[in-house]
């Protein structure tokens, strides 16, 4: 049997903590260690692996190429250890442990409702819902820092492994009725382009989708206000003469009861939201429980 280098799981957890905090003192505090103790264990890990893992200076300066590889393996090993504990402790009451669920901001109302239902069914399950960009979700699945992710996907990908389709996202214009000046109902994207718009910033996938639909409709509106938060958009349209464009799932969460809602047509655009999960076998029990619940309770 090949001899293993002298390190343990605590050393790997410290390496991951350092990646999360990007700061020696904060990583040490998060691990209930002194900074010298953390630094000593990282050095011991480097000695065990016979390679430098981090660039050292007066402050944390990042991981060496070898450190990045070690970090990837550390996350995988710790995820597998977590899966082992979950699998052995799974009882009649279902899975226990933490389910780390990443979600694109537009789907957070669905994620909240889903989490509440899961918590009721599995009382020993703890759920963390993390609002993240599509790119960050991909990274989280790849490095096993997420157990599952609710994100956009292309319709052509609906049958690929590692993806479970959830629902279609359509879009509405939202504003105070006096800002629009017409009864609620339908509105074309061309008419929406003439409104005083406030939209998400263009680093958000939802905004890029909206820009693509406007382009299809032959329009190029210039929003007067941009934010990377739906809450900021809601605050603006409730108090001021602005309109915004939101996914239907935000409206169904009851966040627009005091506002007018117009379904956008010409074209009626649909984006696709699905559940993605890491490419790993065996699957974590918490991820399996999530998928089983969704199969038994599909979105209407």
Image (tube, grey):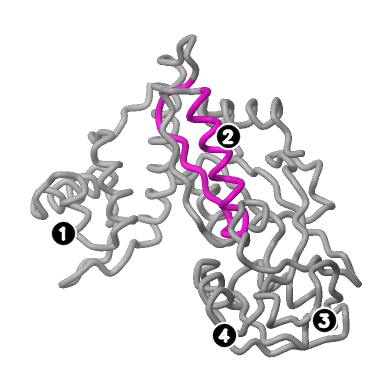
N-terminal of the pair, mark 2 or mark 4, is: 4
What residue would you read off at disc 2?
280
What residue would you read off at disc 3?
215
In three-dimensional space, the C-alpha distance between marks 3 and 4, rounded to whole angstroms, equals 19 Å
What label sits on residue 242 in the rendered view? none
**Image height of 202 relative to 163, above or below:** below
**Does residue 220 appear to the left or right of 244 in the view shown?**
right
What residue would you read off at disc 1?
25
- For the record, the magenta segment spans 95-121
Residue 12 forms part of the magenta stretch: no
Callout 1–callout 2 Cβ contact below 8 Å: no
What residue would you read off at disc 4?
225
N-terminal of the pair, mark 3 or mark 4, is: 3
In three-dimensional space, the C-alpha distance between marks 3 and 1, rounded to whole angstroms, equals 48 Å
Mark 4: give few (<14), some (14-19) or many (20+) Cα within 10 Å.
Answer: some
N-terminal of the pair, mark 1 or mark 2, is: 1
From the image, state whether disc 3 or disc 2 is nearer to you. Answer: 3
The residue at the point 29 percent across, 62 percent down is: 22
Q: Quadrant of the C terminus?
A: top right
The residue at the point 61 percent across, 40 percent down is: 277
Callout 1–callout 4 Cβ contact below 8 Å: no
Q: Secondary structure at mark 2?
A: loop
From the image, state whether disc 1 or disc 2 is nearer to you. Answer: 1
Choose between 89 and 196: the one closer to the eye. 196
Mark 2: give few (<14), some (14-19) or many (20+) Cα within 10 Å.
Answer: few
């Amino acid at each position: 049997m090949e001899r293993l280098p002298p390190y343990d799981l605590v050393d790997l957890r410290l390496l991951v903590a350092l990646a999360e905090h990007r700061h020696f003192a904060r990583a040490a505090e998060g691990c209930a260690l002194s900074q010298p103790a953390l630094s000593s264990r990282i050095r011991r890990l480097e000695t065990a692996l016979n390679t430098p893992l981090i660039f050292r200076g007066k402050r944390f300066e990042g991981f060496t190429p070898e450190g990045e590889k070690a970090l990837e393996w550390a996350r995988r090993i710790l995820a597998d250890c977590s899966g082992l504990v979950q699998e052995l402790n799974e009882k009649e009451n279902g899975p226990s442990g933490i389910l780390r669920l990443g979600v694109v901001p537009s789907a957070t109302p669905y994620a909240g409702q889903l989490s509440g239902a899961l918590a009721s069914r599995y009382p020993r399950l703890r759920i963390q819902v993390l609002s993240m960009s599509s790119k960050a979700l991909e990274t989280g699945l790849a490095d096993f820092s997420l157990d599952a992710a609710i994100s956009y996907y292309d319709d052509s990908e609906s049958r690929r492994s590692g993806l479970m389709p959830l629902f279609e996202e359509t879009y509405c214009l939202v504003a105070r009725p006096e800002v629009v000046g017409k009864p609620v109902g339908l509105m074309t994207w061309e008419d929406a382009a003439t409104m005083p718009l406030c939209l998400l910033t263009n680093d958000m996938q939802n905004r890029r989708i909206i820009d693509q639909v406007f382009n299809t409709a032959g329009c190029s509106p210039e929003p007067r206000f941009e934010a990377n938060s739906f809450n900021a958009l809601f605050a603006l349209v409730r108090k001021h003469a602005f309109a915004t464009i939101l996914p239907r799932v935000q409206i169904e969460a009851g966040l627009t009861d005091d506002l007018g809602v117009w379904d956008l047509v010409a074209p009626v655009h649909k984006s696709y939201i699905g559940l993605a999960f890491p490419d790993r076998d065996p699957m974590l029990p918490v991820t399996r429980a999530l998928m089983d619940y969704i199969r038994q309770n599909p979105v209407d």
